[in-house]
Image: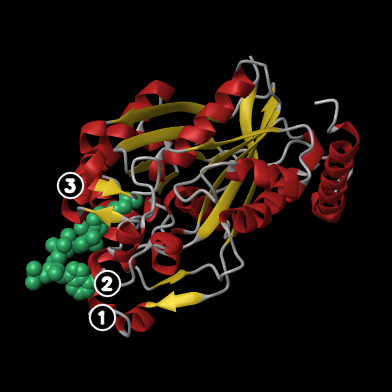
Amino acid sequence: MPYAHITGWGMYVPELVLTNEDLSKIVDTNDEWIRERTGIRERHIARENEYPSTLAVRAGLKALDIANLRPTELDLIICATSTPEYLLPSTASIIQDQIGATKAGAFDLLAACTGFIYGLNMGAQFIRSGSLKNIMVIGTETLSRFINWKDRTTCILFGDGAGAFVLQASDEPGGVVSAVMHSDGSGANLLTLPVGSRFPATEESVRNNKHFIEMDGKEVFRFATRVMVQATNEALKAAGWTLEDVQWVIPHQANLRIIDSAARGLKLPLERFIINIDRYGNTSTASIPMAAVEAVENGSIKPGDKIVLVGFGGGLTWGALTAEWTGPLPDRRPVHPQRYRTLARVRSIFRRLLRFIEGIFFRREL
Ligand code: UT7
């Protein structure tokens, strides 16, 4: 049975930074409150011409670069997102076209902030079953589009960004070892983004700010502190590991106090947790891969390290995944995946043109 190795990683955040100080000019809040209650100092915000796919393409190409894999070698793209570009088509298909992953299937996955863990587990299963070899899992968000900038209880929390992993099959032991996924829909009302077929936009709903993120912060906080410990222990047990075996825990970056509480619950020093919430806020599905990418880049996570990813979010959903960090598969000649981007653009335009011409010639026969 092949192993599913994490062989590439990349992240991207928009350039525009919104500090706590900036927010205090928009709503009744202040830097001290936000830092003390959440650990957040600043977050990145997408500009008008930046979308989940824009961020994901950049993160994804970096991940392919590290894995030294051509986009055309990808079998599947799983895009976990809480803020899809459209309800239809999937953000994953847009990414697939833009990076030129011509042979890949593509779909979006919605499990709120736990989405990246669900996606990584799903990708690993495709590889373990022997049916696919190269998979990209992406978490990408532009949450800023769904924030009510008059609501100080939510607008201070969220940020935009993307993180991507490449999963590859190998007979060498390592990679994703175990995962647990959970859901409790009885708490669906605690964190919602009412955009969809139940709440189609009307003049009135838009006027009443009905299509923004709504959250019962206290309840979500309580739920989070409970499930982070539980899910971590379950995933460790499934892997046959104990906490002593693990070098790093990479938690969903929602609130520093939630991470701190998980650390105390697990009786693990906070230094063993990868934390970057201060600079990005809560980026939902992107938060775990972004934290992992930074930790690899600054030399904290090294090949051979055992890691636990753990997250929670709307749904309610929660889960954890264990993996042994390996890095790129043994060298082959550099394939420069970034070069495929221009080619992908040309191909996309060409295919549209072809579809248009086909339409003219074959319209009468249809
Ligand atoms: O991906 C999952 C997404 N969600 C989460 O993880 C959220 C989990 N929950 C949380 O992180 C926290 O509950 C919050 C950060 C949202 C809120 O922190 P809290 O410690 O639970 O604050 P609170 O709601 O109990 O509010 C305490 C006080 C209130 O004032 P009073 O009633 O005590 O006078 C709030 O009105 O702080 C006030 N407050 C603020 N003050 C300044 C609430 N928001 C703000 C603010 N600035 N932004």
Q: Secondary structure at mark 1?
A: loop
Q: Amino acid under label 3?
A: Arg
Q: Quadrant of residue 184?
A: top left
Which one is earlier in the sequence, the residue at label 1 or at label 3? 1
Mark 2 neighbour density, 10 Å: few (under 14) some (14–19) many (20 or more)? many
Whether residue 128 sits left or right of residue 259 in the image: it is right
Quarter of the picture holding the N terminus: top right
Q: Which residue is mark 1?
A: 30
Q: Earlier in the sequence, mark 3 or mark 2?
A: 2
SS class of the residue under badge 2?
A: helix
As rendered, which of 56 and 34 lies closer to the eye? 56
Q: Quadrant of the C terminus?
A: top right
Residue 224 in the image: state x and y as whole percent: 25, 45
* Residue hosting label 3: 222
Q: Residues within 10 Å of mark 1 (few under 14, many from 20)?
A: some
The answer to whether one can see residue 332 in this image is no
Please tell me whether residue 272 is drawn above or below residue 71 in the rendered image.
Answer: below
Q: Quadrant of ligand 1?
A: bottom left
Contact, mark 1 vs mark 2 (Cβ under 8 Å): yes
Q: Is residue 68 left or right of residue 43?
A: right
- Mark 3 element type: helix
> Which quadrant holds residue 303?
top right
Q: Is mark 2 within 8 Å of ligand 1?
A: yes
Task: Tell me the distance, in whole angstroms, between the alpha carbons under discs 3 and 2.
Answer: 18 Å
Q: How many marks?
A: 3
Q: How far is disc 1 from disc 3 in space, using C-alphas?
A: 24 Å
Q: Position of residue 108 (x, y in %)?
A: 54, 38
Q: Residue at x 30, y 82 (%)?
A: 24
- Residue type, numbered disc 2: Ile
Task: Report if the beta carbon of the residue with label 1 is closer than 8 angstroms to ligand 1.
Answer: yes
For image coordinates 27% across by 48% down, the residue present is 191
Q: Which mark is residue 34?
A: 2
